[in-house]
Amino acid sequence: MRMKHSRVMKQFDRYVIVHIRSISMPLARIALFVIFFWFGALKLVYVSPANPMVSDLLHRTLPFLTFAHFIFVLGLWEMAIGICFLVPRMERLAIALLLPHMVTTFMPLVLLPALTWQGFLIPTLEGQYIIKNLVIIALALAVAAQMQPWMAERKQKSR
């Protein structure tokens, strides 16, 4: 009886893994799209909960830019990242747009410590909001890992 149970569990496990593999990349792309497009859209209409932190960082790093213009461009930038992750073969552009975005996203941890830390290695809610971007980076890298090398992609098109 134990052997039969073990075999059934292995078959079930294999079935689940195969199905998870078939949906994991589409779900990853959709998740990245939803996060970036939604949060970017909130910035476009000036209702993002991140706006005060973005404003503080902007005044500290680029004081010659107006907040209204910057937040609008940032919102469009984030929406573009989301769209690029959703559209097949736009991953390279998504990653290129994501890199500077993530660098600037982590800046408040260093430049605005009163806003992002309540103690040594104890983030505020805003700090947690920033640190969770490590998951976004990991998910984006997982999507990028599925890409074909650029030259191999071009050779396939020419055939």
Image (spheres, helix red, strand yellow):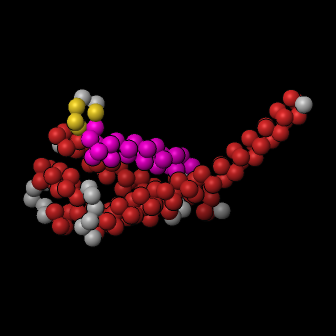
Residue 115: x and y in percent read 19, 44
Residue 148: x and y in percent read 57, 51
On the rendered structure, is 141 left or right of 156? left
| Residue 76 sits in quarter | bottom left
Dominant secondary-structure state across the stretch colored magenta: helix
Q: Is residue 88 above or below residue 123?
A: below
Residue 74: x and y in percent read 27, 61
Q: Quadrant of the N terminus?
A: top right
On the rendered structure, is 58 left or right of 7? left
Q: Is residue 13 above or below residue 33?
A: above
Residue occupying the far left of the picture: 64
Residue occupying the far bottom of the picture: 45
| Residue 43 sits in quarter | bottom left
Over which residues does the magenta segment extend? 123-146
Q: Residue at coordinates 45% horizontally, 61% vertically from top-left?
A: 34
In this orientation, does residue 37 appear? yes
Q: Closer to the camera, 68 or 16? A: 16
Q: Residue at coordinates 31% horizontally, 52% vertically from top-left?
A: 101
Q: Residue at coordinates 66% horizontally, 62% vertically from top-left?
A: 159
On the rendered structure, is 38 left or right of 48? right
Q: Is residue 159 above or below residue 149?
A: below
| Residue 116 sits in quarter | top left
Residue 55: x and y in percent read 17, 56
In reply to whether residue 126 is colored magenta, the answer given is: yes
Q: Residue at coordinates 75% horizontally, 46% vertically from top-left?
A: 15
In this orientation, does residue 111 appear? no
Residue occupying the far front of the picture: 1
In reply to whether residue 82 is colored magenta, the answer given is: no
